[in-house]
Amino acid sequence: MGRIIDLDGKPFSFDPEMQSAVLDIPQIASRYIEHPASGITPNRAAQCLRGAERGDLIAQSDLAADIEEKDTHLFAELGKRRLAIQGVPWSIEPPPNASANEKKDAEMLDEYLHSADWFDAMLFDATDAILKGYSCMEIEHGMLGKMHIIRAIRWRDSGHFCLNPDDLSELRLRDGSHAGVAFQPFGWIVHQSRSRTGYGGATGLVRTLIWPFIFKNYSVRDLAEFLEVYGLPMKVGKYPSGATPEQKSALMRAVMDIGRRTGGIIPAGMSLEFQAAANGQADPFETMISWGERSISKAILGGTLTTEAGDKGARSLGEVHNEVRREIRDSDLRQLAATLNRDLVYPLYALNTAHAIDIRRLPRICFQTKEPGDITKITSAVMQLSTGMDISDPWIREQTGIPQPTPGEAIFRVRQSGNEPAQTDKEMPPEKQEKTEQTALAARLPEAKSSPRDELDDMGDAVPARRLQEAIDPVLEPVIDAIRTRGLAEALADLPALYREMDDSRLMTLLSDAMFAAEMKGMLDGTGD
């Protein structure tokens, strides 16, 4: 492969082989994950976090994986945030004012990535960075004919990476050396999620979540001990004075076993009594556990009412909390889009385009995070505003979520034909389309109120129909042409602009003659002649 340029404009030689295979890094295959959360203490947690600040990410990475595995509440809340990204629609968009070649390249990338079976799994693996601060995935390149493709994307354990000691914001691959090795260009997707401001090892949520995790688990352990002491009845064995050691041992075995086996034997003269459990309160432990879970929910989702029921006003507050969660999702998507544009979209574009690359005009992945509005409200507002302002069709489609029809696609139209099923423009003959549109237009006009005929009506009937048609045709011609070419809905929307094209000179002449005749009729009637 020839030399190509990266996003900084620097040329490099592309190597399609996977970096971990080329370097034969032993940690990739042989590292076992430790479980530092077992018996974790605040001092031990602080040591893990301090190590990450100095560039050693192994302990903090293992700690993050361990608490996600052990705490079901943390796992559920983190899963909500990670899975919220999966269902968001996305597309590859060309740069603004794109040329034909730029549009063609964007369409090629969009079609390929939507058909890639590894894409959804890659999105989910990238969100591992929310907890750990970073997620690194290695790209396995391949060829399909003349097209460079991605065969697979391999998630790599976050413990395989370290920070550059000279630049703590730069992640590197551990190879046994002090500084590690830089990532191979076009070989990795490296997503760094910024839940807080800091260097590479200090941006993950694990640094915030570890403290409520520790204190919650202290209370869980204490509650278990409390239930062991106060939750079970006490079993007391009594032996008579003078009992031999063998008899005492037999009684002790019976006391210890009878709770599990619900039966046993003891020597004659001995007794076994069950006493009520001692009184105690578990509320302090449950309060501490609840505090820990609420703190975890706030750190991950920004609130608690999307997880549990609240008190009065919980519904309105839950809607507010859900809006906060949506804002967090959109922030995650913006960060993820920047990573994918840099490490996925651009490499595929650079390796496959046949045109000169301008790094200022690149295709990009866009997530459609805007929720469609209420179509009924939007339609009502647009119909009212369209008489006084021009409204963009793409804006209306964006607000309603209605996609732009593709060329040659059948267009649905609502017909004013009673119970007759709606037809598309392609299914209806042209003459029937025109007749239906005229009927629909007539239905929108106000009905004229009938009144008794008089002599003026007779005078109007005396005007030749041909002259009336010649006078009205220049007025209606722009509207009729608009209906035939663009359809009824667009013609009605353009009526203010079409008004300027109407030629009413003949109609005005005819109306002037009619006014003159009416005045003369009135004058003659007034004189009695």
Image (spheres, rainbow, N blue to C red):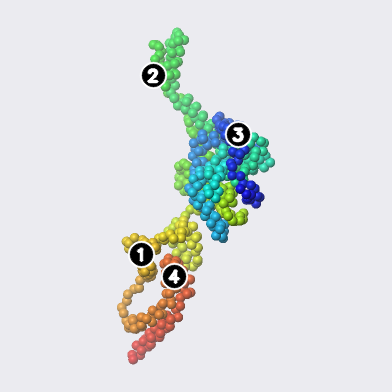
Q: Mark 2 or mark 1, which is nearer the start of the sequence?
A: 2
Q: Which residue is mark 3?
A: 26
Assign a secondary structure to mark 1: loop
The image shows residue 18 at horizontal and vertical percentages of 58, 41
Characterize the local packing of mark 3: few (<14), some (14-19) or many (20 or more) Cα atoms within 10 angstroms.
few
The image shows residue 420 at horizontal and vertical percentages of 32, 62
Please state which amino acid type lies under the numbered disc 3. Answer: Pro
Please state which amino acid type lies under the numbered disc 2. Answer: Gly
Please state which amino acid type lies under the numbered disc 4. Answer: Ala
Characterize the local packing of mark 4: few (<14), some (14-19) or many (20 or more) Cα atoms within 10 angstroms.
some
Q: Mark 3 or mark 1, which is nearer the start of the sequence?
A: 3
Q: If the image is split into quadrants, where does the C terminus sit?
A: bottom left
Mark carried by residue 482: 4
Q: Of residues 76 and 183, which is closer to you in this image?
A: 183
Q: Of residues 258 and 189, which is closer to you in this image?
A: 189
Alpha carbon separation for disc pair 1 and 2: 84 Å
Mark carried by residue 263: 2
The answer to whether residue 480 is above or below residue 315 is below
